[in-house]
Image (spheres, helix red, strand yellow):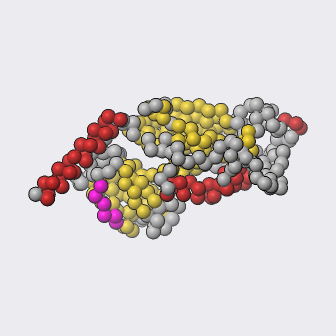
Amino acid sequence: MKRITKQLKHNFLLFFLLAYFTSYGQSMATYTITFTGTWNSTDHSEGGTMFPTNDHWSDLVGTTHNSSITFWEAGQLASSGIKNVAETGSNSAFDSEVDAAIMAGNANQWLQQTFSPNNAMGTSTIMSITVSEDFPLLTLVSMIAPSPDWFAGIHGVSLRNGGNWETSINIDLFPYDAGSEEGTNYDTSNASTMPQDNITSLVNVAPFNDKKVATLTITLESVLGTLNNDFKTGIKLSPNPTHGNVTISNATIESIDGIEIFDVIGKSVKKVSLQSTEFKTQIDLRDLNTGIYLVKLNSSKGNSSLKKLVIK
């Protein structure tokens, strides 16, 4: 009798999940994000300021998140993370702020990509990021370097429009001052602003005019709208890279029946006993060392899905 009751509950959960995702659809989507610099000596050397010979952008960094958190906004004080990105291009403090938001359930992944070539007109492309309805907002920043504390980016841009995923978003980016360091030239040796000011726009503030310094293009790759039968492709891990807390998204009709972690030489380093029919399941891998791992997820029907996971 207990076996029958358990099976009925299992079937009910699967039916509920199938009905939910079929009805509401578009639960997850993948996007490509391209940041293209248009910062240049003609438009951005006002007031006699010399354009730098070592012009470059710091890594493009950010996260996808929900509306419960704002990482930066004009008119507000810059956090330590945003301040460090804007002043020196250092990402560690901002990374920690995103990690804290992930732990609090307000963000779900850290995004980072270099520029190629890394100069004022360079491009940074983040491929195939997976976004869920729970975390549809996108925040990104990059330092205009060298500079006192100038940066460009977006905050809280929604990838959802009503009940649908946006297919394409194009945004012109303009410079901001983080309000944390003095200076009006392209250099980094300046006194701190005391007390710290709010983030402000640098449009029409020398050395900038009203011309954009970059463009951001966000392009939809694909949408996962309903549950599917392919356990191999229907499993997603996020954030990836991670500091150890991993969310498993299961958009299939099969439940997860166990997880095994392997290192790069194929040695099994951890097993996780898990029986879950939930769409999202969280596991803690913080006891594993930094490195690249293969995560093998087994289904209740004997199928498996192998995913690469980077722990940093």
- Which residue is nearer to you in this view: 11 or 60? 11
Kindly identify the residue that appears in the image at 43 percent across and 57 percent down.
246
Q: Can residue 66 be seen in this view?
A: yes
Task: Tell which residue pokes out farthest to the right in this image.
Answer: 48
Is residue 115 rendered to the left or right of residue 144?
left
Number of marks: 0
Residue 256 in picture, x, y percent from top left: 29, 54
From the image, which quarter does the N terminus lie in? bottom left
Q: Is residue 119 visible?
A: no
Q: What secondary structure do most residues of the magenta stretch adopt?
A: loop
- Which residue is nearer to you in this view: 33 or 198? 198
Residue 267 in picture, x, y percent from top left: 38, 67
Is residue 42 rendered to the left or right of residue 216?
right
Q: Give the range drawn in magenta.
A: 271-276
Residue 136 in picture, x, y percent from top left: 49, 41
Task: Tell which residue pokes out farthest to the left in this image.
Answer: 1
- Which residue is nearer to you in this view: 239 or 9? 9
Tell whether position 104 is magenta: no
Is residue 33 rendered to the left or right of residue 179?
left
Q: In this view, does 311 lie above or below 129?
A: below
Is residue 230 rendered to the left or right of residue 153?
left
Kindly identify the residue that appears in the image at 53 percent across and 47 percent down.
68
